[in-house]
Amino acid sequence: MNILIVEDESRIAKRIERMTRAIFGDRLQSIKHINTLQEAMKFIGNNELDLVLLDLNLNGSSGFDLLTTAVSESFHTIIISAYKDQAITAFEYGVLDFVPKPFNQDRLAQAFKRIHTNEKTATNTIKFLAVKKRGGIQLVPVEDLIYIKGAGAYTKLFLADGTKELHDKSLEKLEQLLSYSFERIHKSYLVKMSEITNISVASGSKYMAELRNGLRIPIGRTKYKDLKAKWI
């Protein structure tokens, strides 16, 4: 694990680092502490990361200025902040968890555990997926999303208007973040359940999901029974 801590209070940053080292042990490859948004943005752009631990108030600057960029990257973001009233907004932008201050090691470990499990976020309020565009970040409304296809380390987002967007997060990471209205119907596909109009068996015993737009997407053999039960 390569982890970045973005926290302006040195005492809290050291506490986070101490707990993080204790939790990950030998699995921790590197951990870096930065106390300003500007330096953090530069570091993110030049280093491979697995996780960012972000405070929302950095010397008077808003962590949300960094968050919109962070959630567009391949890594997960966990907020550690005393501003509990901003938790819902943070989840809307696609963070994996929100750890309120003050916190203990058990609560931090709980957040870290979700990085390597298929457990989805504790809330289904995510409203946007942030994608990189030339010159900045575009927030794609989740309500406009029909399905997502895995493309190696990346994913392709397919929208209702026919457009496609490329996201840096893997299908597994987006599966963790998206609400329960999306289901992993195949190793390569996440689909919005409300878009499925029919589930059928095609020639060669291939299972297919037909969407409102007429597109047919394969269903994994191990997913068929569970998907049909949920769809009905």
Image (tube, rainbow, N blue to C red):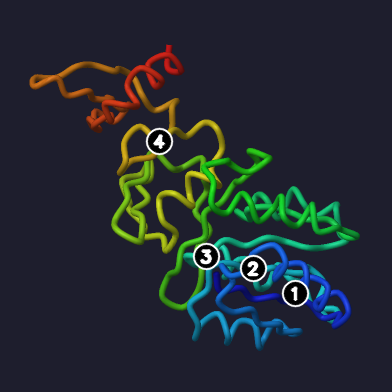
Q: What is the CA distance from the residue labelled 4 to the residue labelled 2?
A: 32 Å
Camera-side mark, 1 or 2: 2
Q: Is residue 154 left or right of residue 3?
A: left
Quick one: label 1, few (<14), some, or many (20+) residues within 10 Å? Answer: some
- N-term-proximal mark, 1 vs 4: 1
* Residue occupied by mark 1: 17
Amino acid type of disc 2? Gly
- N-term-proximal mark, 3 vs 4: 3
Q: Is residue 26 above or below residue 140?
A: below
Say if mark 1 contacts mark 2, CB within 8 Å. no
Q: What is the CA distance from the residue labelled 1 to the residue labelled 4?
A: 34 Å
Quick one: label 4, few (<14), some, or many (20+) residues within 10 Å? Answer: many
Amino acid type of disc 3? Phe
Camera-side mark, 4 or 2: 2
- N-term-proximal mark, 3 vs 1: 1
Can you say which quadrant of the picture contains the C terminus?
top left
Q: Residue 28 is drawn in which quadrant?
A: bottom right
